[in-house]
Amino acid sequence: MSDFAPVPLKNIKLTDSFLAKWVNLNSEKVIPYNIQRCQETGRIDAFKLVWKPGMPNMPHVFWDSDFAKVIEGMCLDLISHPNKKREAELDKYVDLIISAQQPDGYLNTHFTVVEPEKRWAHLGRAHELYCAGHLMEAAVAHFQATGSRKFLDCMCRYADYIATVFGPGKKQKKGYPGHEEIELALCKLADASGNKKYAKLAKYFIDQRGQKPNYFEEECKQLGLSVPSSFAYVQAHIPGREQKDATGHAVRAMYLYSGMAEVADRFGDDELLEVCKTLFDSVAERNMYITGGVGSTEKGEAFTQDFHLPNAYAYAESCASIGLALFAMRMGNITGETKYFETMERAVFNGILSGLALSGTEFFYENKQEFTRGLEDVVSHTQYGKRQPWFNCSCCPTNFCRFLAQLPQLAFSYSESAFCVNIPVNAKIDLPMAGGRLKATISGNYPLGNSYKLTIEEAPKSNVSICLRIPSWADNAATFFNGKQQSSRPESVFSAEGLFQKGDELEVRYELNPHVNYADPRVSDAAGKVALTYGPFVMAMESTDNVTADMSTLLIDTTKPFKMTTAKGLPKGTPAIKGAAYMETAAEPGHLYSTKPPKRKACTFTAIPYCLWQNRGEANMAVWFRTV
Amino acid sequence: MSDFAPVPLKNIKLTDSFLAKWVNLNSEKVIPYNIQRCQETGRIDAFKLVWKPGMPNMPHVFWDSDFAKVIEGMCLDLISHPNKKREAELDKYVDLIISAQQPDGYLNTHFTVVEPEKRWAHLGRAHELYCAGHLMEAAVAHFQATGSRKFLDCMCRYADYIATVFGPGKKQKKGYPGHEEIELALCKLADASGNKKYAKLAKYFIDQRGQKPNYFEEECKQLGLSVPSSFAYVQAHIPGREQKDATGHAVRAMYLYSGMAEVADRFGDDELLEVCKTLFDSVAERNMYITGGVGSTEKGEAFTQDFHLPNAYAYAESCASIGLALFAMRMGNITGETKYFETMERAVFNGILSGLALSGTEFFYENKQEFTRGLEDVVSHTQYGKRQPWFNCSCCPTNFCRFLAQLPQLAFSYSESAFCVNIPVNAKIDLPMAGGRLKATISGNYPLGNSYKLTIEEAPKSNVSICLRIPSWADNAATFFNGKQQSSRPESVFSAEGLFQKGDELEVRYELNPHVNYADPRVSDAAGKVALTYGPFVMAMESTDNVTADMSTLLIDTTKPFKMTTAKGLPKGTPAIKGAAYMETAAEPGHLYSTKPPKRKACTFTAIPYCLWQNRGEANMAVWFRTV
């Protein structure tokens, strides 16, 4: 079993911080807005099961998952932000969902009213088990938030039914989801319900994936569909345990790997855990943008090959970065290794938050690493290159609802004798441990400022470990216990074990400096360039703040000192880097190509956090810059 | 009227040279191979008009154009390479084509046997007038090659019929081609037949294009098709005379602009000529790869916006570069300005020849400026990133047949009192001029060597001008008349006028050095990088000759001298540049991003002509490199 588990939301009370603002925005804007859009588009009424051919708003195969994610978000958010009115609204939605359950336990709006004859017929593409997974996660969240078992029991009945349909038995289908998600959801359902058979079903799906004969191939033949040359898109080209490279649709991959990690952990399956480690390294060491974005092409929203990380043509779907953070969190908790939390932090502060506008009502589906106005349709699916109020395929907006609501859980882990700060958000913790309650306050100005500390308000009566992560970007970090400096060269964790007392203070101090980062030069679009970071923030330049809209003509002068300032038109305190730069123009006007090098003119540059770009109107943007 | 016209093929006899090898390859391999593929795929038998529903090889809407281009190539090639057997074969094909003509003059296999009810119903997308245009060009070539009028007369009948269908009359359609080509073909038909009305029809098509109400929009409505948001793809978003920016499908654009130039020239339409100049500059100054490739995206095979010239995602269709060369040739001949021939030469020696393998039987559809194995499907239409034996849409292979056959015509222009060498291929010229025949020999080792000369074998008995183009890449050029140096700082043309005598020699001498080229830094993928050229050749690095397959890790040391050598495994004498380089590796292995700059190790690089890449097996390739 894991070394650690996420601290439950009910044991965390966030106080003001950069991340708390996003969690609050989710509660105040993102969730109500997504409910409204689900209502307008028919995603809620779909559960009334009244749709008939010829009527508008035909329930789409993935609609259930969209609404389920919003419901999950509502539930989790209610733990952090109790609200009677919203609880009543939630109860109504949950009753509506439950009412859509069929006598045999089945629950899917599309395959109940649109294509009932196709139930389980097209696992490869029809999102049927994927929708079930998100409904299960929502049900678990509902149980955690309200204590009511009605939604949980409903989804257990659904899972019981699914367990009769799929499995090794003679009359059972040997299939597994085309879009993974249910694997991790079944593990959560097993925990919440106490019924381990759901975790076994998750293990079945994972073990069955990619076995020969290929289930999806047989399915295509039965449906009279052409058989794709490979099922790599859905990670079913080879068995999961043989997979070494992050492959196919990036969101699917992240959810599969998360499910594999859950199963590996629950069954003590070291072989499967090794596969997860290998796949994580494939992502983080060879296939991840510096922003934590994953998925290098819009074609299949997929991984391509090692080191292919194009900037303008990046896909880096918001959901994929969310999936990466969730995978990384699991790997961090299972192994206790900080490298996973480093990647989680990278994804959260950059590739995830970039997908949500400060308004809370506009979204990126793709998170470009370089953007030039006018090229939206060239470098992306139509519409996805700009912030949009909604999408026909609205997985990303609805995913924010549930991800931001659970964000505090990513920040802290615990075991019965240990408490870990993975992302030091300001919070009050009240946690039962083996020796009694641990009450503590985490405070600082993270991710800005130069320190953060944990103050013990109440200590367990037995030895506990307290671990504070020291970010890799923290320069000259030092650790202090009750004001006394500890080891002068701390590693990536400040770990203290013992009998703590009320008033004990553990502190991490460091310098927060802008950093110049280089990519592996095999990354063609980043070779010879640098990206600036400031703490966990990848900094980007927007045309808004700079002397030219032609971002490729700017060079950063890394020989001169950078100056920290604040960004105009962004929330108070948003850090910006200002520095010396040069702007190039062609040597011979009117000549696209010349044997004379371009001319250079001194100027300054301003870089803002990548996650906040395109919040001040449309602008050109880049992350990677040449230097002098 | 034009200052100049292309010298007819019958007046040119190529002798051995770099380009003559390609012209001969076309005769020996490319044409017979394309005939074979047209036969195998049903493109020839389509003209038998025996296809019925349920039979294989349904004639596609663009098939007629494919075969027409091969026939045009066969005809033109017969002028340069007389061959009785092939002439007999040609005669058979021509009779077959003629046999497909309908009583009213109509000639289109698809709309005769597949969708007869749709004749002229879908001009926007159905290639109907495009096919007619290529058949007309083939007929003109046939007349030139054989003196027989049968094909020409057939196509005049077709054009006569088209002129009854389209025009300003009350009962006439106000349409124009969705894929331009017929405009320039009608001008050629007018010249060959002596009937100016065909040129007037060309002018009608051009003037009508993009007028309101938009013909294609009306057509979509009539067909019950959704109306696109813009008709920029087919250059019909605004009237042609209002167009200032190269727009839409690149091949269509090149053929339209060529047709506009022909019409402007024939009707003394200075306004239209200005439009052509503006559009040419839009292409050559802001939207053209250094290889003469045009079309920056596979989406619509189209132009995007100024300075957007991605390397790996380049489209740069072979046909588009052919179209650019043909447009540039026309502009050069009309205006006498060498800048057009510079671009023509750039396209010929790079973006065009790159599309044809040295085998003569493999082709590029897209001409990438950077290529990494494994990314074929990511950066391009499936299959198009590699050399292929044929395509379902085989416009490019068939276009080589006719383009290479007419290549000698691009090299030389003339008027009744002038003769110009635009590309100094070795040749013997025998040309009637106002004062009698001009017989001359062009000799040298162009595009290699350090000089080329024109020797008069027989001179007209009146004053003539002889113009030898001095390429912009020729260093320290000097010009000599009968061995005596002329102006010490010659411009882009060595122009001599007077009464010439047998034995007179005009010579251009220059240094041929490798050059380092810079792009306008607004070109994001080339900013901070250099491309090497040697004479008209853009030089590329293939992994085959270099220390690494990761081309982005290589930096050229431009501070050290380059050394000219020959490329291994390529035809004898193929130039290669060898020089000092550095190869970078990540500072911290396993770290995709690091605050430490990559490590550098000295090495050498070898660059070969871009047009010859991927002729020695699959390789990674790049044109633009960083420098130290």
Image (cartoon, coloured by chain):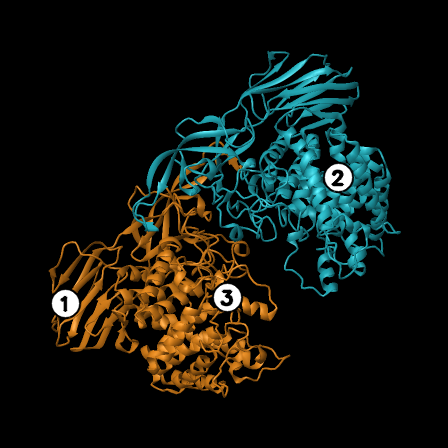
Chain colours: A orange, B cyan
Name the N-terminal-most of marks 3 and 1: 3
Nearest-to-viewer mark from 3 and 2: 3
Tag 1 near tag 2, CB within 8 Å: no
Q: How many marks?
A: 3
The answer to whether residue B599 shows anywhere in this view is yes
Pinpoint residue B238: horizontal percent, then vertical percent: 67, 52
Quarter of the image for residue A16 reads bottom left
Which residue type does callout 2 highlight?
Glu
**Residue occupying the point 64% across, 26% down:** B425
Q: Is residue B254 above or below residue A488?
A: above
User: Which mark identifies residue B72?
Assistant: 2
Give the distance between the C-alpha atoms of the residues marked 1 and 2, in whole angstroms: 86 Å
Pinpoint residue A392: horizontal percent, then vertical percent: 53, 69
A83 left or right of B358 in image: left
**Residue occupying the point 62% across, 48% down:** B247
B558 left or right of A377 in image: left
Quarter of the image for residue A611 reads bottom left
In front here: B512 or A614?
B512
Which residue type does callout 3 highlight?
Asn
Pinpoint residue A300: horizontal percent, then vertical percent: 51, 60
Pinpoint residue A247: horizontal percent, then vertical percent: 44, 59
Do discs 3 and 1 belong to a common subunit? yes
User: Which mark identifies residue B122?
Assistant: none
Chain letter belonging to callout 3: A
In the picture of the structure, the residue carrying the numbered disc 1 is: A497
**Residue occupying the point 70% across, 55% down:** B125
SS type, badge 3: loop
Tag 3 near tag 1, CB within 8 Å: no
